[in-house]
Image (cartoon, helix red, strand yellow):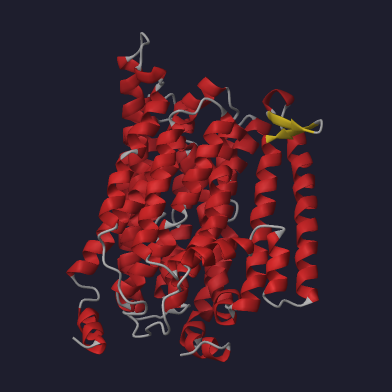
Amino acid sequence: MPESARIADRTERVGGPYAWYVLIVLMVVYVFNFIDRSILTILGPYIQKDLGLSDGQIGLLSGTVFALFYGLFGLALGRLADTWVRTWTIALGLSIWSGMTALSGFATSFGALAAARVGVGVGEASASPAAYSLIGDWFPREKRATALSIYSSGIFIGAGLSFAISGVVVAGWNKAYAGGAAPLGLSGWQAAFLIIGIPGLLLAALVMTLREPPRGLADGILTKGPREPHPFLKMFAELGTILPPFTLFTLRRDGATGRVVGANFLAIVFAIAAAIVLTRWTDSLVPAAKLKILFSVGGTAITSNAVQWAAMALGVYGVFAWSQSLSVRDKPLYTLVWKTPTLLLAALAGTLISFGSYAIGAWVYIYAFRMLHATPAAAGIALGLGGALGGLIGTSMGGIVGDAWRKRDPAGRLKVSLLASIVPLPIVAYAFFTTSLPVFYVCYALYGLIGTFWLGGITTTMQDLVLPRMRGTAGAMFFMGTTLLGLGNGPYMVGLISDATGDLRFAILCSLGGAPIVWLCIVLAIRWLPAAEASRVERARAAGEPI
């Protein structure tokens, strides 16, 4: 069969039964992604007790340690998704993060557990950029928000199941071995890591069997030219555009001007200075009894806050350096990402929403356990199943409603996201002021239902504003914001404020302070979206794209 006939035959299957099969498999992968990512939420109290960790350190493990490597490696792995076989990229990452989750069960110190979480972050960074790219090729534009929302429901199913499974495993394990003699001397939280991590290795084999569609299939914009012959070298080269001091050499190699290289060097100096200032300030906020010193370097005590701000400085600098590099070596991609205000506003809105949702999700179980005297198994099931069911329905319905609204209004998806960022706030506020545990559970489920309608509109908007060959990178950029800045700061800031004030409720509610900025970003994105979407091909062509 001629190549044109094969492509025509495949085009007929866009949005067909096999596309839905791929979508369901990818959603299950995302469920595993968030089970492994969220498990620390419910295991936090047990880990704190056994390893003697502060709220700030739990915040670091839940957010920063994972998020830094997820965010930075996500940019490189997003590039890998745009140049290599996407199904293999996902399978490889799934094997890595599942193995590192299982290894977390043998951790006996903060350092060992942090190292395992780094591995989980690197592995998980591979999944969504490649999945977004696959979904963009298997589903037509008019169904894309629905498909991406169904995929994204794995966030809440996974987070919810992590609550339910972990709570049951810990309670059952501790009861069965209350007298000691547990296998390998493991405690309940260590057993939970092992039981949750191992099945992901089996799922990776299934992912390897998925078909790889031609890039641009659903849009009729097929990527021209041969496949990248050295995708992993390309990936490691991408890391060189993010991590100092390689960034300076990479910019010079790619032909950057002295002015650009000088700006990069100044950014390194600024990042180091900002990290030092923020470390000293936040250290001064925390009572001495709660200020954890992790280790010393040359007589200087390195605290949890120092790790946090060093990580954030590296992350923000890495994103800045990456944008500089793109402006030199891939001007069409740079134009459609960094010179499209609508896309940047959507990314910022998603980042701030994620900051609040990650902060609440990371501490909701500990809050119920500490403030409302919940029992481990009951809280795990109630919060987990409520969050999973609410997130599944809310995320999927948000995509369906957004696609329907878009038929009448080009910005309909973003209007759904705007409403979803407003309506849940009073529900969240009431949840953290009630003294009734059942009411708290119901409020959390409603928050999961209504507060997840936003996701499909934001993610699909970003995908629609770039060309098919750029979708992996655009997806990585979205997750860089939501994970590096949202997850990396949300749980940590709650832990910091809780340590400083002794008021966990106040600390959690502070995470909602960015809501007005979210509303402004989405309103502006709604206004500018039609023009940005209509001009993407012309702007890419003007920047040198061969289409």
Residue located 74% across and 25% down the image: 288
Q: Is residue 450 visible?
A: yes
Query: Vertically, is 516 above or below 200?
Result: below
Front residue of this view, candidates 125 and 230: 230
Residue located 60% across and 36% down the image: 495
How many dots with numbers? 0
Query: Vertically, is 275 above or below 225?
Result: above
Front residue of this view, candidates 528 and 275: 275
Return the x and y of residue 168 as percentages of the image width and height: 31, 28
**Left of 537 or right of it: where is 12?**
left
**Quarter where residue 384 is shown:** top left
Residue located 57% across and 30% down the image: 110
Query: Vertically, is 218 above or below 390?
Result: below
Return the x and y of residue 109 as percentages of the image width and height: 56, 27
Return the x and y of residue 472 as percentages of the image width and height: 45, 68
**Left of 118 or right of it: where is 30?**
left
